[in-house]
Image (spheres, rainbow, N blue to C red):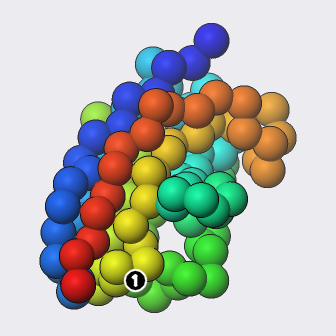
Amino acid sequence: QVQLAESGGGLVQAGDSLRLSCVPSVSTDNTVAMGWFRQAPGKEREFVAAIRISTDIASYGDSVKGRFTISIDNAKNTVSLQMGSLKPEDTAEYFCAAAVRKVDQYDYWGQGTQVIVSS
């Protein structure tokens, strides 16, 4: 069992930046990929970003490309999502997820952290 603890959400204005963090209860080296997803009220869960542990290759959802960056700090065992040029449509609950067997199959999920972007 892997626990994921997200933090960093909050209320910001359009155009601002925000950094989300996720600390797993195991080393990220024990996973194959770490990802961020989001879900806005009344909408389906949306892929935001992911990073493959073995290669550090990152991928992004179309709506956040060029604005968000996912990274891993191995010393702190922390997965971060740096969000820039935030828009009201980025408002959502953001979830960290860990894949331990297949890179596109997420086995564990955090509780979520809320991001609200005001216009």
Given residues 119 and 61, the one toward you in this image is: 119
Can the viewer see residue 49?
Answer: no
Q: In which quarter of the image is residue 85?
A: bottom left
37 to the left or right of 71: right
Q: Which quarter of the image is occupied by the C terminus? A: bottom left
Query: Where residue 15 appears, x then y in whole percent?
Result: 22, 86
Q: Which residue lies furthest to the top in this view?
A: 1
Q: In this view, does 51 lie above or below 23?
A: below
Q: In this view, does 101 lie above or below 69?
A: above
Query: Where residue 109 appears, x then y in whole percent?
Result: 58, 32
Q: In this view, does 31 lie above or below 69?
A: above
Residue at image position (57%, 18%) is 2
Q: Is residue 86 above or below residue 6?
A: below
Q: Residues within 10 Å of mark 1 (few under 14, many from 20)?
A: few
Q: Give the residue pinned by disc 1.
A: 67
Q: Residue furthest front?
A: 42
Q: How many labels does the image show?
A: 1
Residue at image position (36%, 37%) is 6
84 to the left or right of 40: left
26 to the left or right of 80: right
Residue at image position (33%, 71%) is 83
Q: Which quarter of the image is occupied by the N terminus? A: top right
Say what amino acid the circle numbered 1 marks.
Arg
